[in-house]
Amino acid sequence: MLIYLSRADALALAFDIMMHAGARPEVAGTIADCLVRAECDGVLSHGLSRLPDHVASIRAHWADPAALPDIMQVRPGLLRADGGNGFTPVAARMARSRLTEMARQEGLAALCVRNTHHLGALWCDIEPLAEEGLVAASFVHSRPRMAPYGAKKALIGTNAMAFAFPDGLGGAITFDQASSVLSVGDVRRHAREGRPLPPAAGLTRAGIPTTAADDIMNGGPLLPFGGHKGASIALMVEIMAAAMTGAAFGFEDHSSSYPGAASSNAGLFLLVMDPAITSGNDATERFMHLIAHLHSDPDIRLPGERRRANRARTMQNGITIEEDLANVLFSLRP
């Protein structure tokens, strides 16, 4: 059975759950917006199903729902933030206007965040920047959940990256991907729905290839997409999100000391660029020219296009969530 929610109802539900868990209004609003954006865009693995994870990390006293980031400008194009053990999207949201101003002034601007938790889609942090005519990339790492190429145990996170650029029409072309074949959220959906994983998606705890989602949920490592290529990207993300920000490396994570914790205390590196300054020409026309060229093949689907189609539909019709998830969410609401 499916439960219908309007977008406004979904936002209110997520906001109330986060507030009941102890969040400040600005934190609750940011998390609710990110999760409902993902849900409305059809990215169910990073939508409302991640709310119980937020609450679990809070109840385990692993993440602080009342924390606001301490953001300081250390160079003309560089912001550094300590998240105070709060949630990463809050730091990204609070720094957005300053990053935009700095990028338009300097051509490039970066935000380095440490000591935060990220449990949702990365594109929520950067797509609004691309809609303002900027180009943006973000990198977030996590505790080890993936076996690098050739390894049989989890040594590195499913480290994710996102990239967005303007489409020249006020929208954005955006991709957001883990460095593993599937994200942890996708594996959970497969486990919940009893579906097998794609081949070469993960290993059992004994290091044997498996397509059973339960094997991964019970501690088996995921595998990188593209073999050694995905493993290299995971390493790059680890450097960008941890070493470049001053955050703990994924293997230094100690969430296991907090029973029930669902997140990693990690870092975010967010880079924003103004193409009008870096290129010195009419970047809008260039973006439109590139997209028109790609669409010369009518069968192509560019990153984020399906999400935007889902968004347009759900803005009118609302969303539906599975009854089991609805029951969990309603139980978390005051």
Image (tube, helix red, strand yellow):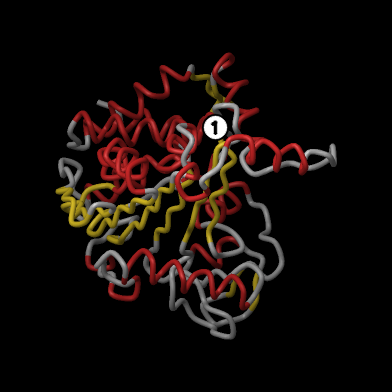
Vertical comparison of 334 with 104: above or below: above
Between residues 9 and 313, which one lies in front from this camera angle? 313
Vertical comparison of 3 with 133: above or below: above
- Residue 124 position, x and y percent, is 44, 39
Query: Can you name the residue that lies furthest to the top here?
Result: 316
- Residue 50 position, x and y percent, is 41, 43
Q: Quick one: label 1, few (<14), some, or many (20+) residues within 10 Å?
A: few
- Residue 313 position, x and y percent, is 62, 20
Q: Residue at x 28, y 75 (%)?
A: 252
Between residues 312 and 184, which one lies in front from this camera angle? 312
Between residues 277 and 190, which one lies in front from this camera angle? 277
Query: Can you name the residue that lies furthest to the front here?
Result: 280
Apparent side of residue 274 relative to residue 266 in the rendered image (left or right): right
Vertical comparison of 209 with 295: above or below: below
The quarter of the rendered structure image containing the N terminus is top right
Quadrant in the rendering for residue 102: top left
- Residue 181 position, x and y percent, is 61, 63
Vertical comparison of 67 with 132: above or below: below
State the count of labels: 1
Between residues 332 and 301, which one lies in front from this camera angle? 301
Q: Amino acid at mark 1?
A: Glu
Quadrant in the rendering for residue 237: bottom left
Secondary-structure class at tag 1:
strand
Please name the residue that numbered disc 1 is placed on.
Answer: 322
Apparent side of residue 105 relative to residue 162 in the rendered image (left or right): left
Q: Residue at x 54, y 84 (%)?
A: 151
The quarter of the rendered structure image containing the C terminus is top left
Q: Residue at x 43, y 53 (%)?
A: 138
Q: Residue at x 61, y 30 (%)?
A: 308
